[in-house]
Amino acid sequence: MADQLYLSLWYPNFRFQSLPVALTGAMRQFAVIARDGDAKSELSRVVAASVYPIDWTESPIYQRIYVIDERAQESPDTEGSKIENAVAEATEQLHEDQAYEFEMRWMLWVPETAGDLDAVWRLEPTKVRIIGFGPDFDANSYEQNGHIRVDFGLDTPWVLEDEDVDADATKYIKQNVEKLLAFTLSVEKHCGISSRLLWTESGEPLAEKLIARLQRLN
């Protein structure tokens, strides 16, 4: 059964005022993995930014959706979608009871099924949300979620039941897992975190499951 996949990040001696810097650092590492060597890739841009007050039941008090296309490299209207600019605008007024959410994309192999036909895998832009938590947001939920949490969506691109894995699926799952682990290790190496946790909403120990999956696919 599909499960929600997250990566939580904690920083040593963390001060709330440094949240924009921490967000920018994590998002830069994501962009490096997402664009895969293409410095001009649209995948290095922010797709949307939102700020939520109090908890997730509240409507966002700030929201901006960016136009990301081939014009993004030349048009001054899209300068705001650069990571540094999007973070600076959304966090211009920091409040400890708010959460700051940024949507980005990366390319993953995703299975599609039609009726009784076998799954067809397609390389598609897939949404990822990178969220920075104020210490008072949602009853201090940062203690469990991290100072920053990365929401990858459903774990389907990385984990499938064994009976669903044929030769083609094996190749695509391996590429997805390698990309996920590359981002996780890049954040650990470059962002000065004190700890990280790759986890699922159900509580299943996904890190061990992913490693086992890679070992079986090799």
Image: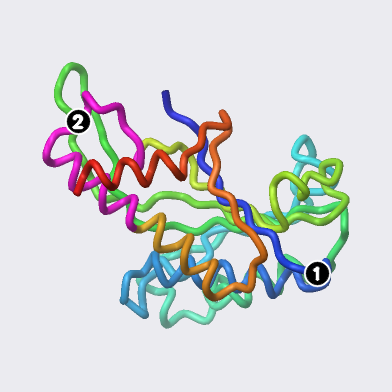
Q: Foreground residue, 148 or 215?
A: 215
| Colour option used | rainbow
Horizontal arrangement in the rendering, residue 212 relative to residue 183 (left or right): left
Q: Foreground residue, 198 or 141?
A: 198
Q: Position of residue 42 (x, y in %)?
A: 40, 69
**The magenta stretch spans residue 168:** yes
Q: Is residue 89 above or below residue 159?
A: below
Q: Is residue 92 above or below residue 122?
A: below
The segment highlighted magenta reads 157-178
The mark found on residue 119 in the picture is 2
Q: Amino acid at mark 2?
A: Ala
**The magenta stretch spans residue 195:** no
Alpha-carbon neighbours of circle 2 within 10 Å: few (<14), some, or many (≥20)?
some
Horizontal arrangement in the rendering, residue 191 relative to residue 53 (left or right): left
The mark found on residue 31 in the picture is none
Q: Residue at x 42, y 23 (%)?
A: 1
* Residue denoted by label 1: 13
As measured in the structure, the alpha-carbon distance from the residue carrying label 1 to the one carrying label 2 is 47 Å
